[in-house]
Amino acid sequence: LPVPPVGADLDPGQLRRYASVSLFTERAHAAALDFELTSGNAAAVAEICRRLDGLPLAIELAAARVRLLPPPALLSRLDHRFSLLTGGARDLPERQQALRNTLDWSFGLLTAGEQALFARLGVFAGSFSLPAAEAIGTKSPEEGQAEGAGQVMDTLGALVDSSLIRPQTRRDQPRFALLETIREYALERLADSGDWAQAHDRHAAYFLALAEPAAADLAGPGQLAWLDRLETEHDNLWAAISWLAAHGPLEHAVSLYGATSRFWWLRGHAPEYARLGDDLVAGSKDMPPRQQAMVLIQAGSAFAANGDLARGRQLAEQSLAL
């Protein structure tokens, strides 16, 4: 269902025009007769509908909880949505009584190959391209799993037909995405599959290979094209650097961070750039001096770009000493 965009008018009368908010309000009132959409809870209700991706079942289950949790408290618990969103109407089929049951039912209808690819696609933060899906999904021949790029494309098409993956088009190129609720479920299935580390490693390797040519072009006549391309992959770049900073190789995290440095501050992402720099600095203590110096100067530049000149100077002086 349509959800209020970020920055939408929070007037209750305006918000009710969005079908997701209207459904939430109706179901919440049925659960607690004194519930009304007001200026005091409108922001929380709008954010709940956004966080639940406009999924009607999820909204109904969330609204039923207002008997115990007012919207702001309900919103704070959505990070544990699968345990929260239970207890649907008892006359519904079992799969519709809780969000997890519904997704378990849908997942169970997939073939083994479709299940494997669906779980691995959970590593993508935001949307992803077909080549990226192929890089994640292509595996050595195993029973029930995609073996080559062509088979990955066919399996991806089956997941689109099952409404688990949403097709998109950006700059005339096909892209795909999972609703955040469905992505969370896919990541649970990935953890269960034993494929967690390999899928994240492949994700990071793909975006490192994608970004390496950007370093020179971001300072040349190809800058605008690369800025637009990297903006499309913004969330995936963050996820890849974070994974490499935490799990290694740290050198690859530094390479990806450095190759995309101009993107982060030219496109207004300096706060994120600085937070990533902090993670890299913390992990760089055991690196050879020259590599550690590179980490420190890159992170120092990030803090300076974000307006924290004292921290930027501190890291730059440490780098200079090395």
Image (tube, helix red, strand yellow):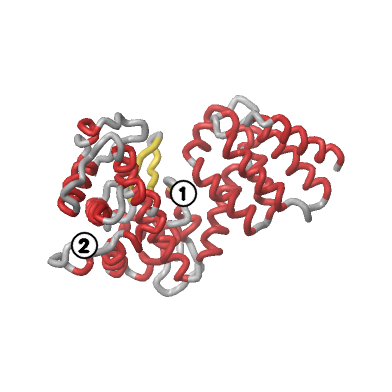
In the rendered image, which residue does mark 2 sit on? 88
Residue at (36%, 70%) from the top-left corner? Answer: 112
Quadrant of the snapshot with the C terminus: top right
The residue positioned farthest toward the front in the image shown: 34
Circle 1 Cα neighbour tier, 10 Å, few/some/many (<14 / 14–19 / ≥20): some
Q: Is residue 175 above or below residue 215?
A: below
In the rendered structure, the answer to whether residue 221 lies left or right of residue 314 reads left
Residue at (43%, 49%) from the top-left corner? Answer: 130
Residue closer to the observer: 208 or 322: 322
Q: Amino acid at mark 2?
A: Gly
Q: Is residue 144 above or below residue 209?
A: below
In the rendered structure, the answer to whether residue 161 lies left or right of residue 279 reads left
In the rendered structure, which disc, 2 or 1, sits on the residue that comes first in sequence? 2
Instruction: State which quadrant residue 85 falls in.
Output: bottom left
Residue at (29%, 32%) from the top-left corner? Answer: 10
Image coordinates of residue 278 in percent, x first then y, are 66, 45
Image coordinates of residue 28 in percent, x first then y, are 20, 50
Image coordinates of residue 264 in percent, x first then y, are 58, 35
In the rendered image, which residue does mark 1 sit on? 125
Circle 2 Cα neighbour tier, 10 Å, few/some/many (<14 / 14–19 / ≥20): many
Q: Is residue 161 visible?
A: no
Residue closer to the observer: 112 or 291: 291
